[in-house]
Image (tube, rainbow, N blue to C red):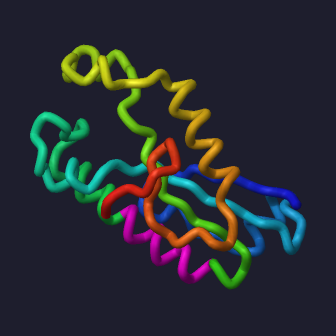
Amino acid sequence: MSELFANREGVFGAAVDERLLAKLGVPQGSTVKIGNATFELRAILRLEPDRVAGGGMFYAISKAALNMAMRKAGAELESRGIIVATIAPGIVLTDMLATNRPSLVPRSRTAEESVAGIAAVIESLDKSYDGRPRNYDGSILPW
C-alpha cells in the first residue's frame, strides 16, 4: 500500500482531487494521508499565558480555521480513502523560542525529535482515525 504525506501551508492547502493524485503518481486505491501543523486550543484561547504559542491574534485565528478546515476535509475525503490529520509538533527548540520565550527551552525538543514523533503518528493513522487533533507523541489534543 502506497502512502503520501502532504504538509500544506494555509487553510486551503488540503484540496485533493484525482488529478493531483495522478500527477503525484499515487496509484488508484492507495491510502493517502494529509497532515498539517496545529497547536493546543488553550494556546489559541490564551488560557495559560505562559504557554501561549508565538504569534498574535491572526495567527491564532488562522490555526483555528485550519483545524476546522482539516476536520471538514477529513469528513469529505474519508470515503475516498484519504486520511486528513492535524498534528501539533510540540514546543520545538528554535532560535526564536530561545530569544522570545527562554522559559520554554527546558520543555522543548529538537526539530528532529518532533519530526520523528510526527512521522510515527502519521504512520500509525488508519481508517479508525477519528479526526481529533494529535500531539507529536500521539496523545489527543484538547480541541
| Residue at figure coordinates x 28%, y 15% from the top left | 98
| Residue at figure coordinates x 33%, y 65% from the top left | 65
Callout count: 0
The answer to whether one can see residue 36 in this image is yes
The image shows residue 99 at horizontal and vertical percentages of: 23, 15
Q: Nearer the viewer, residue 35 or 127?
A: 127
SS assignment for the magenta stretch, majority: helix
Residue 23 falls in image quadrant:
bottom right
The answer to whether one can see residue 9 in this image is no
| Residue at figure coordinates x 83%, y 67% from the top left | 30
Q: Nearer the viewer, residue 100 or 47?
A: 47
Residue 1 falls in image quadrant:
bottom right
Say above or below: 54 vs 122: above
The image shows residue 43 at horizontal and vertical percentages of: 21, 48
Q: Is residue 23 magenta?
A: no
Side of 140 where 56 appears, left or right: left
| Residue at figure coordinates x 59%, y 68% from the top left | 129
Residue range of the region highlighted in magenta in the rendering: 66-77
Look at the image and tell me in which quarter the C terminus lies. bottom left
Please, which residue is most extreme toward the front here?
Answer: 139
The image shows residue 139 at horizontal and vertical percentages of: 46, 51
Side of 55 where 46 appears, left or right: left
Side of 8 where 43 appears, left or right: left
Side of 67 where 128 appears, left or right: right
Say above or below: 101 vs 125: above
The image shows residue 63 at horizontal and vertical percentages of: 32, 56
Q: Is residue 72 magenta?
A: yes
